[in-house]
Amino acid sequence: MVDCQGLKWVDMFGPIGDNAGGIVEMSQQDYKEKPDYSRCVAIVATASLREMIKPGGLAILSNIIVGLLFRNLGSFTGHPLLGAKVVAAMLMFGTVSGILMALFLNTSGGAWDNAKKYIETGALGGKGSDCHKAAITRDT
């Protein structure tokens, strides 16, 4: 049996939920002429760039730190290209891991879609149930 109560509280997309408040507030405003779409785009773009500072810095700084660390270690052990070899290996491992993660996420997305369709057939409460809401949220 699938426990859908725990799925409602899983927040894999914390930064998205944190930054969605500005869009919700803007969508609830009373527009006299037409909505300000450029403001919506500005809110989303600014929030996404702000949330990517730390991961981007980690991706850049980790290569530099590992390269310098192993270059110094290689100079002591008589292997002057050790830093370059280690950084190349780290980048290759990261690329292969990224490909495998993409395949996994593609498969899990299909599984969420199938779970949603299964619930819509009437299982686990059917349409409108908490399980259905959780499946729609995760499928999206």
Image (spheres, rainbow, N blue to C red):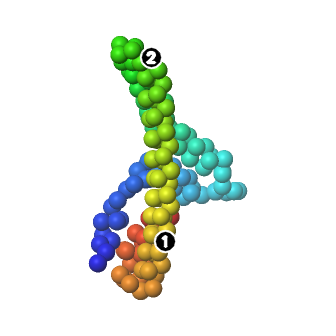
The residue where tag 2 is placed is 80
Q: Are marks 1 and 2 in contact (CB under 8 Å)?
A: no
- Residue 59 placed where, x, y %? 47, 34
Q: Is residue 60 above or below residue 3?
A: above
Q: Which residue is mark 1?
A: 113
Q: Residue at x 43, y 29 (%)?
A: 86
Q: Residue furthest front?
A: 78
Residue 19 visible in the displayed image: no
Q: Marks 1/2: CA distance? A: 52 Å
Say whether residue 12 is left or right of residue 38. Answer: left
Question: Who's the residue at 45% across and 64% down the image?
Answer: 108
Q: Tell us which disc is closer to us: 1 or 2.
A: 2
Coordinates of residue 54 in the picture (x, y in percent): 44, 35
Location of the N terminus by quadrant is bottom left
43 left or right, relative to 86: right
Few, some or many residues within 10 Å of mark 1 (<14, 14–19, 20+): some
Residue situated in front as seen by the camera: 90 or 139: 90
Q: Secondary structure at mark 1?
A: helix
Label 2 Cα neighbours within 10 Å, binned few <14 / some 14-19 / many ≥20: some
Residue 95 visible somewhere in the drawing: yes
Secondary structure of the residue carrying numbered label 2: loop
Mark 1 and mark 2 lie on one chain; the one further toward the N terminus is 2
Q: Amino acid at mark 1?
A: Asp
Outermost residue, bottom side: 122
Q: Of 15 and 118, which appears nearest the observer?
A: 118
- Does residue 40 lie above or below 106 as drawn? above
The disc placed on residue 32 is none
Residue 29 percent coordinates (x, y): 57, 56
**Image point 54% across, 52% down: which residue?**
23
The three-letter amino acid code for the residue at tag 2 is Pro
Q: Residue at x 37, y 74 (%)?
A: 131
Q: Nearer the viewer, residue 66 or 115?
A: 66
